[in-house]
Amino acid sequence: MAKLSKRESSISYMKENEKLFQCPICKTNMQVQENGNITCEQKHSFDIAKQGYVNFMTKAIHSMYSKELFQSRYEIIQSGLYNPVHEKIANLIDFGVQSILDTGCGEGTHLAKICEKLHPQVVSLGIDISKEGIFTAAKHYERHIWCVGDLANSPFQAQSIDYILNFLSPANYTDFKRILKPNGKVIKVVPQASYLQQLREQAFAKSEKEQYSNEQTVSLFKDQFSKVYIERIIYDQPLEHHLLPKLLEMTPLGWHIENNEDVAINEITIDLDILVGEF
């Protein structure tokens, strides 16, 4: 039997899990057709691209993030910089999880790395407003559902998802509450004071931005949930020389450094709060 194309494989996988989708326009149920169209009861239609993702946006959005940025992010995360974080998050996820959605997934590597540590039957989905990010995710990772979409108008059914992952990305708690199953959980990852401090020192030397606080973000998270668990993870990771330009490109901190050639960093600090919330 001939191997399925990426699009054919995605059609099959999305068809298996079509019950997770709702139309972002009219909110009715959706069906995945054999030809790769995803249609709702009101005949709104979205097409699975040849790369294996689906664009649920109802209007074009200009993204400030390029394909080159997402490719750099892919290479940085693949290098193992966040491996301890992925391990920690996987350990916080219940063994019987059926579905996990990464909101603001970018190029999808955090989700893919975490799912490698979960049982293979987990249905994993990623959504991002950036088409460039989702294009890169579909390029590198199969057997995931990749969607271009807006969290303010997401294409997922109510009470359909066990875990929502929100990794260094803006949150939409109203939609999180809508799409989570009863007893479902949100895992949000936010920077702590020393996150990428070597870059922060060079980007904002001797200014108030050299110091970072996540107090406001954490406080907002606590306000949303009846149960909250917080764990901090901090470590220094050696940084190979060839990865430094990739790191500078993938983070907004690097955008504030005028001359990248002046940056000399041999290690980088990862300092994150992992917030787990249950409504």
Image (cartoon, rainbow, N blue to C red):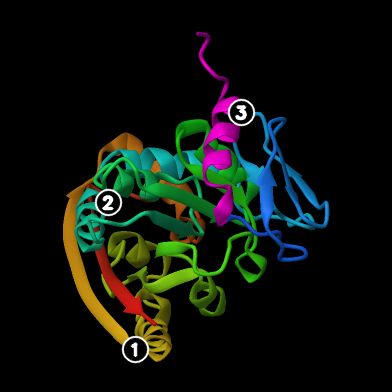
Please provide the residue range marked out in magenta.
1-20
Q: Residue 7 bears which disc, if any?
A: 3
Q: What separation in Å lies between label 2 and label 1 (alpha carbons)?
A: 29 Å
Circle 1 is placed at which residue position?
226
> How crowded is the residue under tag 1: few (<14 C-alpha within 10 Å), some, or many (20+)?
few
| Label placed on residue 82 | 2
Residue 261 in view in this figure: no
| Image point (32%, 46%), residue name | 115
Left-right relation of 263 to 260: left
Give the mark nearest the N terminus, 1 or 3: 3
Given residues 104 and 40, the one toward you in this image is 40
* Nearest to N terminus: mark 2 or mark 3: 3
Q: Is residue 62 magenta?
A: no
Foreground of the two, 182 or 217: 182
Q: Residue at x 58, y 61 (%)?
A: 156
Gap between marks 2 and 3 measured at Cα: 30 Å
Residue type at tag 3:
Arg
Q: Does residue 35 lie above or below 93 as drawn?
A: above
